[in-house]
Each structure stands twice: as structure tokens, then as C-alpha cells.
Amino acid sequence: MAGILFIISAPSGSGKSTLVNQLRTLVSGLEFSISYTTRAPRGSEEEGREYHFTDRAEFERMIAAGEFLEYAEVFGNYYGTARRTLEDAEREGKDILLDIDVQGAAQVRERLPDAVSIFVMPPTPEILATRLRNRSRAEGHVEQEVIERRLAKAKQEIENYRQYGYILVNDILDRAVEELEAIVSSERICRSDGTITAEAARLIKIAEACRQQNSMQRLGPVLASFGLQGT
């Protein structure tokens, strides 16, 4: 039986990687798809852990060979998900998590409309700028021009929030982790034939509050802070 495909997207600096790493310690049976990229490793990143690092020529060879389920170019670097990652997970009946940007998520949803999509939002542009600045400082350089470009890109990506089934606001890390865990657990519960226990009902309630259509009261101030309007 094929597993569930979870897509998670967020603007750079939103804390998505931290959320995903914590989720992976809390939830079993969830495979993480390691994307390919042409950018250089950051900080303590290792080949085959955060990404498969490759050069532009090899990435473009893989594009030409049809080896990617999705790919996109972001800030001058390619990022992509290999088809075989999903094929392996499907063969083994495992759930899989794709950590991909808005462009890649749109490609995957078009091909696999049953995928569960989750968008992580930073609470304000000021907090996002601080996170980006701290990350840049940790990497040994702070370029205000790069930070401004990423903030502008974040606003463009946030405009696509309506394309996602679930929305998380990463203002309080522990709460965002709990919500992400609840979404994964709820989707599994709802697709199983088991009895709904009190704990399962609690997780479903948390997840339902994160559905896009149920999140607008919480999202309103976030969208407004980025100069956007909700519907």
C-alpha cells in the first residue's frame, strides 16, 4: 500500500528545517526525501544528510534524463527531488516528507494531487529578517542586500499560501512542532480503519485548526505584517 506524501514549504529563514528535524525525532515511519542542489553546503551540512550536493552540469544532465519529480532554480541554484525517492518509498509503503519550495510544490501537486501540503509562515518580516541575519552571521557573513532580496522573495512565496491545505505560523517553536506532528498523525489516523481514541481525537482537533480555511483569524495579522490581505 502506498504511503502518504507530505509536502512542506516555507520562505527561507522561517525555521522549516528546525521543524522538520524535530518532527523526524517524534514521528516514526516517515522517510525524509533528500533533495539535490547545486549550492554549496552551509555550516555543518553534510552530503547525503541535508542535501545531495552536485554541480550544475550533473544537475542539468539529470533534468534532461527526466530523473526529477520536480526542480526549480532559486537565487541562482538548482534544487530538485529525484523520482526514485518517491518510487522507493511507494514500493516500501512508507510515508515520505518533501521539503521543497513553492515552485517545486506546485509541480508535485499537479502530478500527485493527493499529497498533503503544509506551508510554514514566519510571524512578521522583522522576525524573519532577524532569523536571516543570525543565520548569515553564523555562516560568517552578513550581506544586507541578500537579506532584503530574501525578504522580498518571502512575500512572493507567502502570497501562494492558498495553494496549501495546512498553514503553520512558526512564532512559538514548541507549538509549531506540536501542530506539525498533529497534522502528520491526523492524516494517518483519518486514512486508517482504527478506533478514534481520545488522544487521536486531540491530534485531529489540533490539525483541523491548522487547515487553511480554519486559520484565517490567526493568519490575518501575519499577512498584514507582510502587506498582504487574506480572504
Image: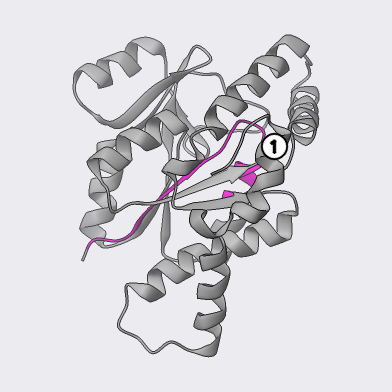
Query: Which segment did they paint magenta?
Result: 2-20
- The three-letter code of the residue at mark 1 reads Ala
Residue 29 falls in which quadrant of the image?
bottom left
Q: Nearer the viewer, residue 94 or 108?
A: 108
Residue at 48% of width from left, 33% of height from top?
A: 51
What residue occupies the far front of the structure in this picture? 231
In the image, taking residue 100 as reference, residue 159 lies left or right, namely: right
Split into 4 quadrants, where in the image is the N terminus? Answer: bottom left
How far across and down, in percent of the image, does residue 161 sit? 51, 40
How far across and down, in percent of the image, does residue 212 sit? 50, 53
In the image, taking residue 182 as reference, residue 84 lies left or right, namely: left
Q: Is residue 122 visible?
A: no
Q: Is residue 34 visible?
A: yes
147 magenta-colored: no
In the image, taking residue 42 as reference, residue 125 lies left or right, namely: right
**187 vs 82: above or below:** below
**133 vs 220: above or below:** above
Residue at 42% of width from left, 34% of height from top?
A: 35
Residue at 58% of width from left, 42% of height from top?
A: 230
Q: How many marks?
A: 1
Q: Which residue is mark 1?
A: 224
Split into 4 quadrants, where in the image is the C terminus? Answer: top right
9 magenta-colored: yes
